[in-house]
Each structure stands twice: as structure tokens, then as C-alpha cells.
Amino acid sequence: MNQGKPGEVTRGNCKEKIKESVWDKALKQLEDTARRINIEPGALEILKVPRRCLVVSVPIRRDDGQIEVFTGYRVQHNFTRGPAKGGIRYHPDVTLDLVKALAMWMTWKCAVVNIPYGGAKGAVACNPKKLSPSELERLTRRYTSAILPIIGPEKDIPAPDMGTNAQVMAWIMDTYSINQGYSVPAVVTGKPIEVGGSLGRDKATARGCLYTVMDAAKKLDFTLEERTMAVQGYGNVGRNMAELSTGQGCRIIGVSDINGGLYNPKGIDITRLSRYVDEAGTVFGFTDADSITNAELLELECDILVPAAVEHQITEKNAPRLKARMIAEGANGPTTSEADEILDDKGIFVIPDILANAGGVTVSYFEWVQGIQAYFWSEREVNLRLREVMERAFEDVYRLSQKEKVSMRQAANMLAVSRVAEACRLRGLYP
């Protein structure tokens, strides 16, 4: 399951045409939100256009001596509420439009949890699984050198995303620090603990998502004990979500990755599955569960569905067949605009991506603060502060949703865009 060309989504070997690119969707969401909250036309025009889009050439020498040139991106959408913040993705199908949309969503994500950042996103169009560790390091250092002038602790702070990890962040930090002449741990977040990372960061996105699910369950008047959950995507977010939710009593009946999915109505042994994935690198081939496709996983009858893979997985084609009571969007932009309307009509409670997966950027903010202060917190303190932020953000969004009689996604967008627009108004336009 991977992101195809703009306007196209790939599941396995099947390509499904969709009506909008992710950038079209991001703009449509912004324009719809602007109409609802009646922001000034000038502010809307500012928010529709990223402040900076950098496209760079990333040549590296492969292990066999051949030169290969990759394309890298860094988009900074907005700085009004603070320095830009956003991950770096390594994936073969990234495009400038995709990175622009992800950067805009980061602006809203930071605003909805009310942390002092704007949004950014970076990417290199490559397949990290086809690069050796030494090639991956050379690619990362070359890409960092190309975006060096526009990143920094007070300007733009990268973090991990799909295809990148703590080691990649360590290489970025080291490359930046060498160019500065001294160690600058606050230039990235999601680093290893040994070089200034924060405890709790590796599971923060999933933990924050679980907190929103727990809050939503209270509103829907049910407990998580023995509730069924299906998780699409068994990467960092999906795997941790499955493991943490099992600890809350959820029964994980379905999981999937790019190679396919698993289904067991009695529940999958997540501890055994995770050990298997550590060895095999995929959920495919795990026994004690039936093989299913990613498309079938989304349509399982379950209490909670967690799409934690890539964009545009829930479309107008499959949305009518979804049977979940609640959807918590662990991924960015997994639901198209047309599907959103269908889910709303079906009465499915959707926790939108900019709220559901904001735990990662929240703990990244904590890491940045710790790095600047050179004073580090315990994991318990990190998790308690994360829960406080996520619960407050969920309550803010839910209250607005009930007051305005709009969906949770519309309420989250209204809250986020209004906060950024108000910051624009207060700061004014220079000169």
C-alpha cells in the first residue's frame, strides 16, 4: 500500500483513481473552514500559500561507485505562531504537492494542540529499503547540507516521518552541528536519547492517538475493555498503537502493512506478532491469523479503525462499506473529502488526523524545550504532560463540534485556522 501519483492511490497492485490530490484536499479544507469562521480574505490568501518551497538536488555516490541523483524538498508553510516544525519523509512517490499539503496540515496540527510552532515538511524521493546504511547516511548528510540555510532551532526543526528514524535525525543533527562548529541538539527532534532525545518520543504519536480514543470513548459512553480494533499500517504509529491499545484491554482483530493484512476475530497476539515482525520485517506470513488485503482490513466490522499508513486510503468507493464505530486517523490525510461526507452521514465518529496524531509533534515540542534548556524530564513526566495537552485539545475540539453542530474534523480545522489567522492579525503585515 503506497502513495501513487497525485490523484491516484495504490493498494497492493491495484490503482484506484481519486478526484483530488492531497494538495487539492488541503486547500479545499482551508477554504471550507475559512467560510465557516469568516476570516478576512487577505488572511486566507496568506494561509493558502506556503512561505517557502525549497526543491534540491541530492547527488550521492552509491556503494558500487555509481552516482545517483535524488530530489529533495523542504516546505515551510507558516511561521506566524513560531518556528516551523515538521518531519522528513523518505519515500519513492513523494511530490512537491504532497509535501506542501503535509506542511499545511502541520500548521493546523500545531495550532490545534496549541503549541508555539508553524508547519513544515521535508522529503526525499527515494526508497530507503533499497539503500545500504552507508548510502542512507550519505543521502541524509547531503540533503541536510542542501537545506542547511533554512533550518535551525529558531527557524525550522525537522523530525522523523515515514522512512526515517532516530538514526537519521542523529545524522542531521551532526551535519548541522559540524557546520555550526558546536553541538546543536535542538535542531531536530526524535533523536536518540544519547544525543539529546526525549524519553517517550518513540511512542508519542501512538500514545497521543490512544489518549484521543480514550476521550472519545467516554463521549460515546463505552469502555475500551474488549473493544475490537483494526490497525492499517504496522510501522511506528500502527505497531505502537496496537501494543498500547492491547494494554488498555482492546482486542486487535486486524493489522496490515504494505504486503497485506491479518485477521483473527478472537484477537491477534500482538506480543508474538511484534516479535515476528522484528525477525521477518513484515506481518505477512504470521500464523494464527487469516490473510486479508488492506482493502478488506478497512472494511472489517470493528469498534475502532486506525488508518496509520499513507494518504487517501478511505475514499468514496469504500467508505459506504466501513463498519467501524470510531475512526482514529493515525496517518496524515487518510480520508478523502468525498469519503468524509459519507462517514458523517453514517454516523461514524472520526477523530481527525490533525488531532489524533498530534502526540508526536507535542512530544517533539517537549524535546525541543528540553534541548534548549539542557534539562531533561522523566518518561513519566513526558507522558503526563502529553496526556494533559491531548485531553485539553480533544475537549476544545469536541466542545466546538457540539456548539457549532459540525464534525470533529470541521471543528478541529476551525479551531486551528482561527488561532493562526488571529496570530496573523495581531502581528500585522510587514512592511
Image: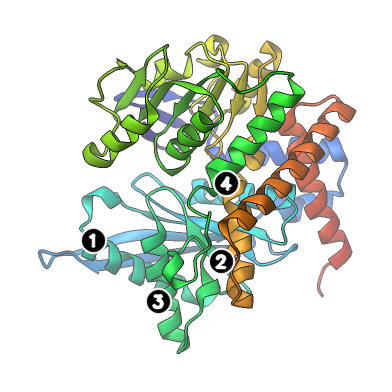
Q: How crowded is mark 1: few (under 14 residues within 10 Å), some or many (20 or more)?
A: few
Amino acid bearing label 2:
Ile
Residue nearest the observer in this picture, 403 or 287: 287
Mark 4 vs mark 2, CA separation in Å = 18 Å
Residue at label 1? Answer: 133
Residue at label 4? Answer: 101
**Label 3's element?**
helix
In the image, taking residue 54 as reference, residue 14 lies left or right, namely left
Mark 3 vs mark 2, CA separation in Å = 14 Å
Mark closest to the chain's N terminus, 3 or 1:
1
Point 55% across, 49% down: residue: 204
Mark closest to the chain's N terminus, 4 or 2:
4
In the image, taking residue 26 as reference, residue 431 lies left or right, namely right
Q: Residues within 10 Å of mark 2 (few under 14, many from 20)?
A: many
Disc number for residue 157: 2
321 vs 371: above or below: above
Point 51% across, 32% down: residue: 247
Amino acid bearing label 4:
Ala
Mark 1 vs mark 2, CA separation in Å = 24 Å
Residue 405: % across, % down: 85, 24
- Give the residue at the far bottom of this rendering: 181
Mark closest to the chain's N terminus, 1 or 2:
1
112 vs 183: above or below: above
Amino acid bearing label 3:
Asp
Q: Are marks 3 and 2 in contact (CB under 8 Å)?
A: no
**Label 1's element?**
helix
Residue 19: % across, % down: 54, 26
Residue at label 3? Answer: 174
The answer to whether residue 55 is visible is yes
Amino acid bearing label 1:
Pro
**Label 2's element?**
strand
